[in-house]
Amino acid sequence: MKFVDEVKIQVHAGSGGNGCLSFRREKNIPFGGPDGGDGGDGGDVYLQVDDAVNTLIDFRYKRNFHAEKGEHGQGRLCSGAKGEDLYIPVPQGTEVWDDDTDELIGDLLVKGNTLLVAKGGWHGLGNTRYKSSVNRAPRKTSDGTPGESRTLRMEMKVLADIGLLGLPNAGKSTFIRQVSAAQPKVANYPFTTLHPNLGVVTLKDVRSFVIADIPGLVEGAADGAGLGIQFLRHLTRTKLLLHMVDMAPADVKQDPIESVRIINKELEQYSEALGKQDQWLVLNKLDLVPEDIRDELCQEVIDGLEWQGKVYYASGITGEGCDTLCDDIMDYLDDAKEAEAAALIAEQAQAED
């Protein structure tokens, strides 16, 4: 299935029904008076998270959505029925923007979350509403108001604990195939990954986390080069970045040190927060590096980058170093959850004081 992570749609709430002009006319009741009912309210439009929806691709084929109009009022004080609300299913992790004002309307992160995006019109009033002591037979009614219409821009950001980044052909897809059941395309040429792939990594103690394979970045990605700018947004939701480095590039002119610097520069240009996000260095494809120079080559990269964070030696093909890396990732995520819980408890205690 094609991955779609940004679409524009039109939503139209239902208009309110008009009020009714009617008078009661029955045998032996010569002065029945007004009995026109009110119209019904128009239906609202909601977006709702549905775990059966994984991408925004359905919106490529249907872009206009209309909620039901309210029915008009009728005689004998009968009010019109309210228009049925429209619930549009969207994938988890969808940001919703008003395309005309560029205002963020909401962020749908949790299953079952709903977001009102267009309010239905108000019902019109029947002539009964205008009856008074000085106007016993009013002929005045009001029409229902139009429902809201909006152009929405929806952006999907994958929800993953860990994000993989690196230049094209750094071995990200091979790594995610090694540690999870995900089966992204793997080939010996750049840009084999054209859309994000998610994999669930399950450890022996049944703990698990979600890892995202993001298409390879190139220099100038933050300015729109390659596929980078289209998918950099997906990294903003992750808790930890794994920077995959090809230690045996097919192009001998490709310097691993320069590769890391290029990617980190793009992250900083795209988002200051993303540039400061926790990042571990994974020196990958070591099965292709002769053992007698492996340690020396890896140390050159670490020293050249003046890397202060964690470093792992790995091979996505053979699985070397992958188990240790996954265990450490799980411990990192558990510690982060404990820290978040402690901070929340402290915040609640401070609020109570």
Image (cartoon, grey):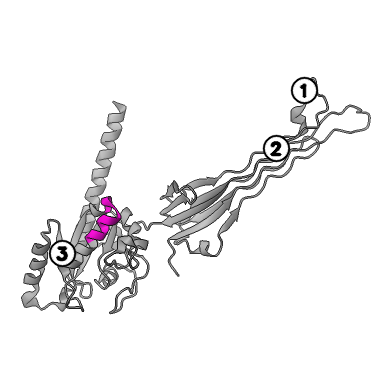
* Residue in the image at 10% along x and 64% along y: 304
Amino acid type, residue under disc 1 in the picture: Ser
Report x, y in % for residue 9. 53, 56
Could you tell me the amino acid type at mark 3?
Tyr
Question: How many residues crowd mark 3 within 10 Å: few (<14), some (14–19), many (20+)?
Answer: some
User: Which portion, as a residue range, is magenta?
Assistant: 264-274
Answer with left or right where residue 47 lies relative to residue 129: left
The image position of residue 115, as x and y in percent, is 49, 46
Helix, strand or loop at mark 2: loop
> In terms of secondary structure, where does tag 3 sit?
strand
- Residue 270 lies within the magenta run: yes
Q: Which residue is mark 1?
A: 132
Q: Is residue 35 magenta?
A: no
Q: Nearer the viewer, residue 143 or 76?
A: 143
Which residue in the structure is indicated by mark 2?
124
Residue designated by label 3: 312
Q: Earlier in the sequence, mark 3 or mark 1?
A: 1
